Image (tube, helix red, strand yellow):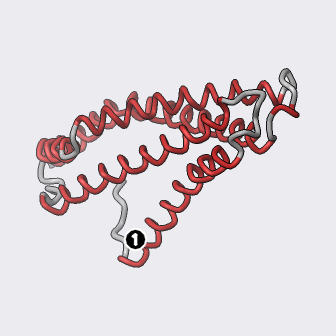
Amino acid sequence: MAVKKLSKGIAILFLLISNLIFFVVPLFLIFVGIWKWSACPGDEILPIWMIFVGALIIIDRLIFWKRVINETRFEKTVPHPGMISLERVLTWEKDRMESTSRKIWYLMAKLKILFFVAAFLGACWSYAFISKSKSREQCDPLIYISIFAFSVFSMTAALVSYLSSSYLHCTAPGTKLDQLAVAALEAVF
């Protein structure tokens, strides 16, 4: 489904709001990790985890925007061919994806895996304080509750994203067959 053209003002507003949302969380993690550096003698890794994950999110967002800028430049330079032929559209899509270096794609994939592992570890480490297997006096609640909530939310979002991507990947052959059927009918009639 294509996104309709946005006015420049709406586009700028969208970019500002989305960047604020995507940078507030990592800055919060980094700030709390530094501020509460010595507030968790029960598990000194938690503030370090907060700083690491915050930096990881910022790096991921910077790479994401680099990819979006590359693809936008490509689309301005090489306009979409329209529905002249399915082969041209597929070639254009392939070229658009290749406009961003494969290194960036691989780096993004590795960052996502590292981020998921970090979220899993963060949930496990912080759960020890929530479940009271470690004394709550040994760590500031702002640290372990923030880490646990963020980790559970991140893993849930990753799972939903993975399942929806898998669904789309599995249904893509049917979509291509539908497009072929429509193209065949258009050619006949």
Residue holding disc 1: 11
Above or below: residue 100 compared with residue 168: below
Q: Residues within 10 Å of mark 1 (few under 14, many from 20)?
A: few
Residue 5 place in picture, x, y as percent: 33, 69
* 100 or 157: nearer the viewer: 100
* 150 or 186: nearer the viewer: 150
Question: Mark 1 belongs to which amino acid?
Answer: Ala
**Residue at image coords 12%, 57%:** 78
Residue 28 place in picture, x, y as percent: 63, 52
* Residue 104 figure quarter: top left
Residue 88 place in picture, x, y as percent: 11, 46
Q: Secondary structure at mark 1?
A: helix
**Residue at image coords 47%, 29%:** 114
Residue 147 place in picture, x, y as percent: 68, 38
* Residue 170 figure quarter: top left
**Residue at image coords 15%, 47%:** 92
Specify whether 154 is left or right of 80. Answer: right
What count of labels does the image hold?
Answer: 1
- Of all residues, the one furthest to the top in this rendering is 133
**Residue at image coords 55%, 39%:** 53
Above or below: residue 167 compared with residue 22: above
Above or below: residue 6 compared with residue 90: below
Specify whether 90 is left or right of 62. Answer: left
- Of all residues, the one furthest to the front in this rendering is 38
Specify whether 40 is left or right of 178. Answer: right
